[in-house]
């Protein structure tokens, strides 16, 4: 199936990045969020990134205009009536995602594929809220989307081979490296990454060392590009907690218990880089 026009639902850090790489690949993109100001925020951030690439000599002004010209802002899910592929990238919350997929199933053309960028939630369960489970799939980009090459392509129990192939090829067209994964909590990426981040938070909680020292050990000792606590702030502590909850409940195994300090920080509204405060401060 040839994909030409897509909708990205959620214009946050992931949705904005997905819209950018899709537009760079020549696709027409409808970028949707609840309010115009959220869509504008996503477009402003994307414009800054593209301008940085112009300053580095990696992009021309005309190319920037062409990329941005392919993106149409939207604040109504009804605009999904015009697309052949939708990728949802809203908050990591099952009931919010289920509501969106139910609506999209009514609005999008019958042949359209509905994908989720969820970090951890069951694709099979999201698919079951629709009447086209064979056309529902996980397409999990990594943050920051324009830089990271991996995309996990997650098959729900009912996902068809045709849907998988279309999404696999779409990832290649976006210059990404797709990896096939079956539907288990946290898939591969967050089943492996998030317990490490959670353990780093336990190290802060138990007073093993300061956040700075913990990050230094992992950056300089293990050559990680970012320490786990900087990475947690970058991902968003709300998202990290949501993923740990999915692992904890999904496997019923205490080894995935979210650190109480993580819960406390999320309750305080210290969500990391996006709110200016997490394990570190951002101005
Ligand atoms: C939670 C989930 O479900 C799954 C996930 O996504 S888990 C998170 C996965 N991501 C990671 O692990 C990221 C780890 N960090 C890194 O790889 C690096 O620190 C980084 C790529 C983010 C930044 O790299 P760096 O070398 O420290 O900084 P810097 O030199 O400023 O940036 C490198 C490039 O990335 C770009 N970049 C940095 N931050 C960016 C952002 N937020 N958006 C877009 N581009 C960005 C820079 O413009 C630069 O581009 P060029 O090479 O074209 O000049
Ligand atoms: N952060 C990361 O590193 C990664 C995250 N993901 C996944 O991507 C998804 C998005 O995460 P991220 O971009 O970080 O989150 P953000 O909080 O940055 O963005 C989510 C966006 O979705 C909007 N939104 C919420 N509800 C709706 C709705 N009903 N309709 C339309 N838009 C809505 C939010 O608006 P408002 O601000 O009003 O809530 C916000 O603009 C999550 O599922 C997350 O797990 C995947 C890979 C990496």
Image (tube, rainbow, N blue to C red):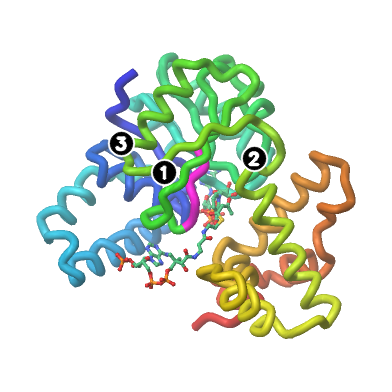
Q: Position of residue 135 (x, y in %)?
A: 51, 20
**Mark 2, residue position:** 187
Q: Nearer the viewer, mark 3 or mark 1?
A: 3
How far separated are the C-alphas under marks 1 and 2? 26 Å
- Main SS type for the magenta part? strand
The N terminus is located in which quarter? top left
- What stretch of residues is rendered in magenta? 139-143
Circle nearer the N terminus (3, 1): 1
* Label 1 crowd bin: few (<14), some (14–19), many (20+), radius 10 Å: many
Alpha carbon distance from label 3 to label 1: 22 Å
- Image location (x, y in percent) of residue 30: 34, 39
Marks 1 and 2: which is nearer the front? 2
Q: Are marks 2 and 3 in contact (CB under 8 Å)?
A: no
Q: Is residue 270 above or below residue 174?
A: below
Beta carbon of the mark 1 residue lies under 8 A of ligand 2: yes
Count of labels in the image: 3
Q: Residues within 10 Å of mark 2 (few under 14, many from 20)?
A: many
Q: Which residue is mark 3?
A: 173
Horizontal placement of 246 versus 17: left or right?
Answer: right
- Residue 233: mark in rendering: none
Q: Tell me the SS state at disc 2.
A: loop
Residue at x 67%, y 72% (from the top left corner) = 270
Residue annotated with mark 1: 32
């Amino acid at each position: 199936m040839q994909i030409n026009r897509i909708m990205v639902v959620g214009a946050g850090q992931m949705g904005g990045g997905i819209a950018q790489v899709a537009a760079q690949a020549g696709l027409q993109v409808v970028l949707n969020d609840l309010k115009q100001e959220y869509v504008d925020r996503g477009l402003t951030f994307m414009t800054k990134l593209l301008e940085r690439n112009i300053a580095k000599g990696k992009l021309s002004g005309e190319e920037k205009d062409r990329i941005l010209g392919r993106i149409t802002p939207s604040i109504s899910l009804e605009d999904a009536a015009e697309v052949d592929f939708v990728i949802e990238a809203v908050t990591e919350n099952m009931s919010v995602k289920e509501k969106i997929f139910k609506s999209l199933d009514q609005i999008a053309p019958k042949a359209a594929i509905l994908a989720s960028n969820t970090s951890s939630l069951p694709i099979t369960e999201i698919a079951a809220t629709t009447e086209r489970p064979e056309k529902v799939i996980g397409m999990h980009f990594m943050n920051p989307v324009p830089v990271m090459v991996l995309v996990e392509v997650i098959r729900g129990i009912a996902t068809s081979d045709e849907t998988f192939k279309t999404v696999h090829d779409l990832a290649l067209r976006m210059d990404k490296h797709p990896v096939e994964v079956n539907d288990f909590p946290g898939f591969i990426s967050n089943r492996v990454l998030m317990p490490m981040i959670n353990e780093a938070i336990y190290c802060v909680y138990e007073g093993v060392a300061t956040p700075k020292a913990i990050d230094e050990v992992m950056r300089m000792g293990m050559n990680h590009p970012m320490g786990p606590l900087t990475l947690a702030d970058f991902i968003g502590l709300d998202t990290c907690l949501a993923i740990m909850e999915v692992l904890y409940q999904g496997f019923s195994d205490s080894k995935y218990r979210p650190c109480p300090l993580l819960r406390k920080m999320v309750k305080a509204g210290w969500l990391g880089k996006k709110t200016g405060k997490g394990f570190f401060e951002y101005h």
